[in-house]
Amino acid sequence: MKLLYTIFILLFSSATFAQSIDGTIKTQTGEPVPLATISVLNSTKVTTSDKEGRFNLILTEGNYQLSISAVGFATQFKNLKVTNKWPNNLMVRLQASSQQLNEVVVTADNMQQDIQKVPAAITSLDAKQIRDYRLWDITNLTAIAPNLFTVEHGNSTSSNFFNIRGVMGFSGEQAVATYVDGVYQFDYFSAPPLFNDVQSIEILRGPQGTLYGRNAFGGVVNITTKQPGKKPSGYFETTFGNYGQQRYTASLSNPIIVNKLFASGSFTYNHRGSIYYNEFTKSGFDRREDYSGNFNLRYLPSAAWSLALNAKLEDDNDRGSFPWLVSIDEVLSKPYQVNTNNTNVERRKNFNTSLAANYYGKDFNFTSVSAYIDWHAYYEGRGVDYDFSPLDALSNAPDQRQHVFSQEIRFTSPSASKSRLKWVAGAYGFTQNTRIDAITFFGPDYVLLDPKATNAPFMNTSFSKGNNKGYAFFGQATYAITNKLDFTAGIRYDHETRSLSQYTDYEKVGDPVISSPKQDYKANFNAATPKVVLSYKLQDNMLLYGSYARGFRAGGLNTNATDPAQVPYQPEHSDNYEIGWKNTFLDNKLKLNLTTFYFEQHNQQISTAMDGINELILNVGEMHNKGVELEVTALPVKGLQIDWNASYSHARYASLLLYSADAGKVINFKGNKPINTPPVSSMLAAQYTYGFTGGKQKLSAFIRGEYRYLGSYEFDFINNKNQPAYSLFNAKAGISTKYFELNFWAQNLMDKKYIAYGSFNAFLLGSPRTYGVTLIANF
C-alpha cells in the first residue's frame, strides 16, 4: 500500500519551487505583438500575449525551450534557464515571416525539438506549407522530400504507398511506416490517405526502427492533425475545378471549460467526376467520392497531465478504380480511355480512435497511447476487370477487414532536465485480426484466354483469417559528452506471432460447391534493431552527424501457397549508414541541409512466381543504394521564399533470384535497378507575397510556381519496361486578407502524359492537367 501511495504522489503531485516568468513580445521596431502563442515544448504549458504583448508563465527551476508564434511573424525558439535568481522580464522580438524563416518543431525522437538540432534526415511541412502545396492526399507527396516517391497504384483513394530510398512494400505490409497522431497504421491500404485538417507532416528518411518499430524500414511518414486550442478558431474551405471537382472542408476549435477542456472537429467532402472514358459503355468510367472527419477532445486535469481523445473516419466510394491497360504503347496512344464491361467500384471504410495520456513531471515524462483501428475495403458486384476488355472472362472482388488494438507506453527524461543525459524507453504491443474473402469470377469468355478451361464459367472463392500479435521493448539515450559533442545509442527488440487459417471454394452453377481442406499455419518472427549516432555542433547554427541504423520489416504468411514450406516468408533487414550536415545562415534567412547515405536491404520480400505460375511473396532480393540529398530554403528578398530539394541515388541489386520466362528457369538478375525508384528527383517551389501597407485587413497578393523533376524509373524487376524522365509544373496565384483567401491553381500545367504505375501487364497514366479555384474563410 505504501508503494502505491508513493507512485500516486509521484504521478499526480505538482512540482514545487515554481517561478513566475513575465515576458513581452514585440516586433523588431518595438511595437507590441498581441495574441502571440507562447508554448513550452514537451509540456502542457501554453499561453498568449495580451494587447500590450505581455505574457506570464509559471515554471519550476530547470532548462526549457519556448516556441513563440504569431500570425504574420516567423516562429522563433527561445532557450530558457529558470533559477531562483531569474529576472522578472523576458523580451522576445519577432521578425516578419516575409523576412525570416520559421524555426520548426518536430517529434522525430518522440519529443518536441528544433528540426535543425536533430541528427537525422527529416523533412517537415507545417499547415501553411500543406495548404501552399495543395496536399490533399498522399499521392501529392512525390518529391516533396528527397528520395520520396508515391506509387499511384490504381486511380483509387486507398491503393497508394510510399517509396523512400528505393524501399517500398510488395505486400499489404508497409516498408515505410505511416503514423497518424502517434498511431501506427498497419496496412498501407488502411493508412488514412486523405489529409483532413493536418497540422504537420514529418518525413524521416532511413530506418527508424528503434523508436518507431515494425516496418519503419525505409523511413517514417508522421502525420499530425490540428489539436484544439485555448481560443475559438476555425475555417471553411471550398474548391471547384475541372472534371467536376468539388471539395468542402469545415473546421472548428473551441474551449468547453476555460483552461481545462477543449474540443475540435473537422469534416471534408470531396467529389471528382470522370477523367477516363469507357469505349464499351460510351460514357465516363471513373468517379471519386469520399468524406472524412477528424474529432478531438483535450482535457488538462492538472498542470502536469494532458488527456487527448481522437477519432477519425473515412468513407470512400471510387467508381472506375484500376483503369489499367495491358501495354505502355496502348496507355499512351489511348490516354484516359478504357474498354471494359465492369464498373470497378471500390468501397473503403476506415475508423481510427486513440486515447493519449501525457504526464510531465519533475523526474520523468510519461506517455500512453491506446488505439483501435477498424478497416473494411471491398468491391461491388464482380469487382475489378482483370481481362481489361468487354469480355466476360476474368474479374476479382476481394472483401478485406481488419481490427487492430495497440498500446504503447513511453518514459522520457523530464522536460526541464539539467542532466547531460536525455533518454526515452518504453514498450509496445498489438493484436491484429484480418479476414479476406476473395472471389475470382471465370466467365464464359475465359475459354478464349485459356482454351483448356472448358468448365467455365465458374467461381473460386478463397477464405482466409489471420491473427497477428506482437510486442516490443525499446530504449534510446543521448549523452552530451561536451557542450558540442553528443552520442546517441538505442535498441529495440520486436517479437511477432502470426497465424493463418484458409480454404478455397470451387463453385459452378448447377453443381455442388467443392471446398478444399482447411489449412492452418503459424510462424514467429523477432528482431533486434540498434541505432548509434555521433553529432557535433560546429557552431550554434551548424550540426554535423554520422549514424548507423538497422531496419526490420516483419515477415508474414502467404495466403495462396500450395507448398506448406512456402507459406511463411521471412523478415527483411536493412543497414543504413548516413552522414548529415545541417546549417542555418544569414540570420535564419537560409537553411541548407546535406545528407549522404549508403543503404543495404537484405532478404527482400518480393511478389514473384518461381515456377512462372504461382505468385508468392518470397525472400529473393538483396538491394544496395547509395546517394546524396540536398534541401535548401531561402528568403533572398523580402516576400520571396524558395524551397528546393534534390536527390541522387544509385540503387542496384546485389542479388535478385527471379523466374525468367525466356530462359524457363530461375536466374539471378544481379545489377538490375529496383522498381519505382527514380535515380534523380527534384522539387523547386517559389512563392512571392506582396503585402499592401495600411489597413486592418492585411491585404496581400501572392504568386507561386512549382517545378518537379523525376528521373526514369523501372516498372518491372527485369528492367525492360520503364518511364523516361519527365517534369511537372504547378502554379497558384491569389489574394489574402486577415480572414479570407482566394486563389486560382493548376496542377500538371503542361498536361504531361506519364506512366504513374506499371507492372508486367498493367499500366496507368498519371493525373492530367487539373485546375480550379479555392476560397478560404478563417474565423
Image (cartoon, helix red, strand yellow):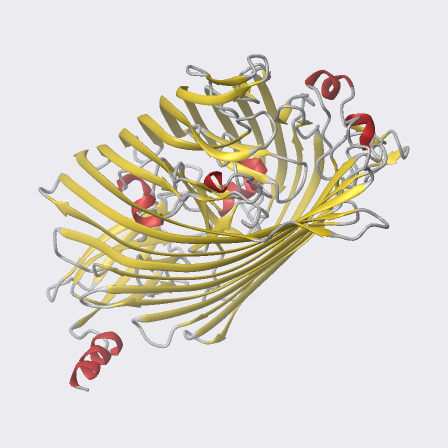
Give 630 or 627, whichever is nearer the viewer.
Answer: 627
- For the point 51% across and 29% down, the residue is 685
- Quarter occupied by residue 416: bottom left
Q: Locate residue 24, reporting x and y percent.
A: 30, 58
Quadrant including the C terminus: bottom right
* Left or right: where 418 falls relative to 761: left
Q: Is residue 660 above or below residue 264?
A: above
- Quarter occupied by residue 705: top right
* Left or right: where 27 falls relative to 321: left
* Left or right: where 738 falls relative to 444: left
- For the point 40% across and 29% down, the residue is 634
Q: Residue furthest right?
A: 282
Quadrant including the N terminus: bottom left
Q: Locate residue 675, reporting x and y percent.
A: 51, 24
Q: Is residue 252 visible?
A: no
Q: Locate residue 275, reporting x and y percent.
A: 77, 34
Q: Is residue 348 above or below residue 542?
A: below
Give 1 or 262, whichever is nearer the viewer.
Answer: 1
Q: Locate residue 412, reporting x and y percent.
A: 24, 59
* Left or right: where 576 falls relative to 767: left
Q: Residue furthest bottom?
A: 1
Give 201 or 412, whichever is nearer the viewer.
Answer: 412
Q: Is residue 356 above or below residue 139?
A: below
Counting the numbered discs, the total is: 0
Q: Is residue 562 visible?
A: yes
Give 548 or 512, whichever is nearer the viewer.
Answer: 512
